[in-house]
Every structure is written in structure tokens, then in C-alpha cells.
């Protein structure tokens, strides 16, 4: 499985945008970029995924670099409830979700 | 829509004892997954079922772990005998499809196992 690199931790202030980076320089052409998050004492929760184009949903936006070697998860207005570990995962056809250690996001009131 | 259900939520056992976890996936989801999450790490896939057949169990320690999904719905994961290093949260997840790249996985709350 191709690997991703994320910062161990990030901080943000409530109601401000948050940009969570992910590097995946060995991504293959068929790998989708998935983001999951895990709130304290809960199972992971799907956030968003994409292949080549930028994606938006009710939770977040995913910006994918033109060469696909990096991507950024954007939370437009962070809330205290967004404090979680965010996982960036590459997933090819039929392959498993391989979680790394993710980025611990702290949101300050 | 009801989510993925797991029980028990917590379990404490002594080493060398056995333990079983139960999972009920979202209705209609053909694919079911069991993950192990050790404290401070991301979840690791143990086994994946497509209906009642095993798709991927390459990371399941088969000398002590077993899992089944009878009738393609509920699933149980068993550890026998347990070791100290099995202390972890065991997560069950389900998805509509057979692990294709764009199928979202829905996770249950997990079972926290402590082996003493």
C-alpha cells in the first residue's frame, strides 16, 4: 500500500478554517484519497474522498494537487466537535484501508 | 438509519482466557470488517468478509484469533487464548460493497479489551 505522511498534531481556533495536509508522493493512478476522522472514544468516521478533482461535501472540502502527490482537507469553520484524529488514506481497487497515525487536531475555544 | 452495533463495550479478562465480540452491521451492507486499534495507533484490519465469505484475513493471528459471519449478517470475533498484547479496541465496520475503492466504511463504537 502506498504511504501517506501527515503532521502528528495541529491546532486551530474555533470558527476559523483548518487546512490539514497530507503527502502521498508514491500514489498510483488508481489510488483514491480517503479521509476519516476519529473522535475520542468513538470509531472512525468517513469524511470525504476523491481521485483527481477537488471535492466538497457537507463536512469538508478536499483539495488535490495537480500531480496528486499531496492533498489538503479543509474544514471551513472549525468547531470544538471537530477535535479528532484525522487520517489520510490511499486506497486502490480492492485494497484495504490502511490507517497511519493521523493528525491530532486540537480546536481552541 | 441504525449504525453498526457492537457488544460488549468493555471487557476485562486475564491472560490465557478466551473472549468473544459481537457485531451487527448496517442492514444491507454486504461487507464487514474487524479492526484492532492499539492505544496511540490507527486501526489495523484483521479480517474482511464479503457476505459470509472471507476476502482478506492476511493480518489475522490465526493461532489465537478466529472470526465468523454466519448467514452473511452478524459476526463474532474470538480470541483464545488471550495475551497481554491483545489489549486494544476492537472495531467492527461495514460497507455496501466488496471493498471497492469508493465505498465508505461505517464503524461501530468498538469494544475495549483489557487483558491482565
Image (spheres, coloured by chain):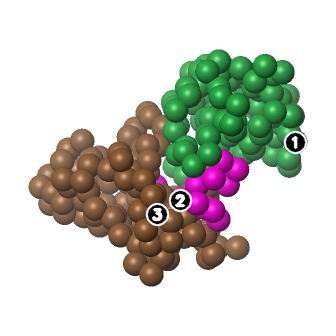
The chain to which mark 3 is attached is B
Q: From the image, state the color of chain A.
A: green
For the residue pair A50 and B26, the one nearer the viewer reads as A50
Please name the residue shown 35% across and 70% down the image.
B68
Please name the residue shown 18% across and 53% down the image.
B63
The chain to which mark 1 is attached is A
Q: Are marks 1 and 2 in contact (CB under 8 Å)?
A: no
Look at mark 3 in the image and give the residue it sits on.
B49
Kindly indicate whether the residues beneath marks 1 and 2 are on one polypeptide chain.
Answer: no
Q: In the picture, which quadrant includes the C terminus of chain A?
A: top right
Look at mark 2 in the image and give the residue it sits on.
B93
**A3 within the magenta span:** no
Q: Which secondary structure, mark 3? A: strand
Are there few (<14), some (14-19), or many (20+) residues within 10 Å of tag 3?
many
First to last magenta residue range: B88-104
Kindly indicate whether the residues beneath marks 3 and 2 are on one polypeptide chain.
Answer: yes
The chain to which mark 2 is attached is B
Look at mark 1 in the image and give the residue it sits on.
A56
Q: Are marks 1 and 3 in contact (CB under 8 Å)?
A: no
Please name the residue shown 53% across and 59% down the image.
B93
For the residue pair B45 and A19, the one nearer the viewer reads as B45
Q: Position of residue B103 (x, y in %)?
A: 67, 55
Amino acid at each position: 500500500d502506498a504511504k501517506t505522511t501527515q503532521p502528528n498534531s495541529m491546532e486551530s481556533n474555533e470558527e476559523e478554517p483548518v487546512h490539514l495536509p497530507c503527502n502521498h508522493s508514491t500514489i498510483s493512478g488508481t489510488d483514491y484519497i480517503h479521509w476519516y476522522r476519529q473522535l475520542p472514544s468513538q470509531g472512525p468516521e468517513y469524511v470525504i474522498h476523491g481521485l483527481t478533482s477537488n471535492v466538497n461535501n457537507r463536512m469538508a472540502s478536499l483539495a488535490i494537487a495537480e500531480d496528486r502527490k499531496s492533498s489538503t482537507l479543509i474544514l471551513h469553520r472549525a468547531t470544538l466537535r471537530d477535535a479528532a484524529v484525522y487520517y489520510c488514506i490511499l486506497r486502490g481497487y480492492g485494497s484495504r484501508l490502511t490507517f497511519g497515525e493521523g493528525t491530532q487536531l486540537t480546536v481552541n475555544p | 438509519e441504525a449504525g453498526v452495533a457492537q457488544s460488549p463495550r468493555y471487557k476485562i479478562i486475564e491472560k490465557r482466557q478466551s473472549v468473544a465480540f459481537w457485531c451487527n452491521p448496517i442492514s444491507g451492507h454486504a461487507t464487514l470488517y474487524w479492526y484492532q486499534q492499539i492505544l496511540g495507533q490507527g486501526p489495523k484490519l484483521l479480517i474482511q468478509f464479503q457476505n459470509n465469505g472471507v476476502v482478506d484475513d492476511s493480518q489475522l493471528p490465526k493461532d489465537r484469533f478466529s472470526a465468523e459471519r454466519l448467514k452473511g449478517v452478524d459476526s463474532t470475533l474470538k480470541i483464545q487464548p488471550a495475551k497481554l498484547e491483545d489489549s486494544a479496541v476492537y472495531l467492527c465496520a461495514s460497507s455496501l460493497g466488496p471493498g471497492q475503492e469508493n465505498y465508505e466504511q461505517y464503524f461501530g463504537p468498538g469494544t475495549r479489551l483489557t487483558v491482565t
